[in-house]
Image: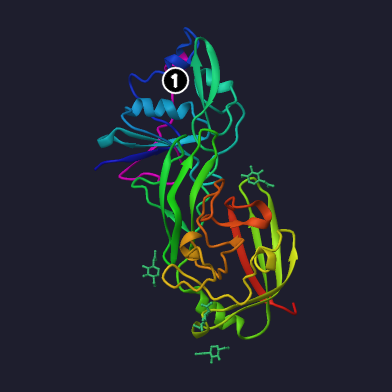
Amino acid sequence: MSMFGIFLVLPVTNGFSMKEYCHKNDFSCEQPFFNQQGKREFGRCSSINVLRRMLRLGMIDCVRECLVTSQCTGINYRPDWQMCDVVGEIKHGDLEVEDGCSLAGVCRAYDCDIGEKCLFEDNKVRCEQVYCVNNPNADKAISDEKFGNHKNLGAGLKFRCKNGYKLQGHPYSFCLHSGRWDTQFRCILNGTGNDNLHTILSQRTYKMRVDLEYNDGNNAQAVYSSFNVGNESSGYKLSISGYSGTAGDGMTDISQNSLNGMNFSTADNNQDMSDVHDCADFKRSGWWHRDCTKGNLNGLYRPGEQGNDVMHWRTLNDTYSLSMTRMMIKPAYV
Ligand SMILES: *[C@@H]1O[C@H](CO)[C@@H](O)[C@H](O)[C@H]1NC(C)=O
Ligand SMILES: *[C@@H]1O[C@H](CO)[C@@H](O)[C@H](O)[C@H]1NC(C)=O
Ligand SMILES: *[C@@H]1O[C@H](CO)[C@@H](O)[C@H](O)[C@H]1NC(C)=O
Ligand SMILES: *[C@@H]1O[C@H](CO)[C@@H](O)[C@H](O)[C@H]1NC(C)=O
């Protein structure tokens, strides 16, 4: 397998032409003169900041794509696959800002935004979105892509969670045609957290705060002035009271199914009070279910979707999936 990366300055090659990006008879645009050879490193590719990845593209065409893509500073080229990566700035500070230094040909004086490629068609210049601007929000995850991530519009990248974390949702992040990432999973700590929780909470009186957020940025909090979890032989029984906050009381309001005094139910250990449901299964979450719960914080991560089994807080926005939740404890007197 041979591969190499070219950074910063691009090579002169016989037959290179930018013709379709140049005004008629602009010879220096068609046959640009590069007075410096790019640095070619055989056997090395940059796996970070790949802006676009294209298959079945010759190396010259790959160079050309770089010349018309915002932020491109070099390419990876893998001849065996004719695989072209258009790569962005590698290390911050490597490049200098210079007047008029931008894209090539007619695109040179044309400001395409980050995420765009410049096109010259029918004697007109235009910009087209071709890659996602940022990186996917994949906290505690690592890429599961053979050649590293790329950012093409429409790309679906696969991830797995770091050691000690387990994945909830689908292991993908998609670069949508709007230029934004849609990450369909989260990585959560793996382990029987309740034993640790019990050990910590049994030492003094704790209060607990829940932070909640949706896709659209809507966010709120629920604070409980007293929070305790029993040991294993007590069924990890929950003691919770003293709601205040902006999210509504999703855990202790009696009319809404107080979880105070409930044992912890899991798929293989039903300890809920429901005659109808096996709550841990129905709500797809281990939790202190009664019949079942208004605050389903361990449910499935499906931002934007609605369902009994997604992570939701019904007093805030019914059964719509939250995009972020956080439970935090601290000693009650602080
Ligand atoms: C999570 O922990 C359990 C029990 O220790 C283990 O069997 C399982 O393989 C772990 N899963 C992941 C994804 O690490
Ligand atoms: C578990 O908690 C109960 C109630 O607080 C207590 O009576 C019992 O001794 C505890 N069991 C263990 C093994 O710590
Ligand atoms: C909660 O767990 C305790 C200890 O295992 C058990 O005695 C009690 O019946 C359980 N409660 C429910 C509602 O399952
Ligand atoms: C609840 O979530 C849905 C879906 O995201 C959204 O359309 C709606 O505006 C939200 N309602 C409130 C009150 O935030």
Nearer to me, 286 or 143: 286
Q: On the rendered structure, is 59 left or right of 110?
A: left
Q: Residue 99 location in percent, x, y?
A: 62, 28
Q: Dividing the image into four quarters, tell me where ligand 4 lies.
A: top right
Q: Against 202, is 126 above or below?
A: above
Q: Residue 173 location in percent, x, y?
A: 46, 46
Q: Quadrant of residue 200?
A: bottom right
At a point 24% along the width and 43% down the height, the residue shown is 1
Badge 1 amino acid: Pro
Q: On the rendered structure, is 221 left or right of 283?
A: right
At a point 47% along the width and 7% down the height, the residue shown is 25
Is residue 12 visible in the rendered image? The answer is no
- Outermost residue, top direction? 25
Q: Against 236, is 146 above or below?
A: above
Number of other residues with Cα within 10 Å of mark 1, as a class: few under 14, some 14 to 19, many 20 or more: some
At a point 50% along the width and 71% down the height, the residue shown is 265
Report which residue position mark 1 lands on. Answer: 32
Mark 1 sits near ligand 4, with its Cβ under 8 Å away:
no
Span highlighted in magenta in the image: 28-51
Callout 1: SS: loop
Nearer to me, 29 or 267: 267
- Outermost residue, front direction? 275
Is residue 297 visible in the rendered image? The answer is yes
Main secondary structure type of the part rendered in magenta: loop
At a point 35% along the width and 45% down the height, the residue shown is 147
Q: Quadrant of residue 112?
A: top right
Q: On the rendered structure, is 299 left or right of 47?
A: right
Q: Residue 225 location in percent, x, y?
A: 72, 74
Q: Is residue 90 magenta?
A: no
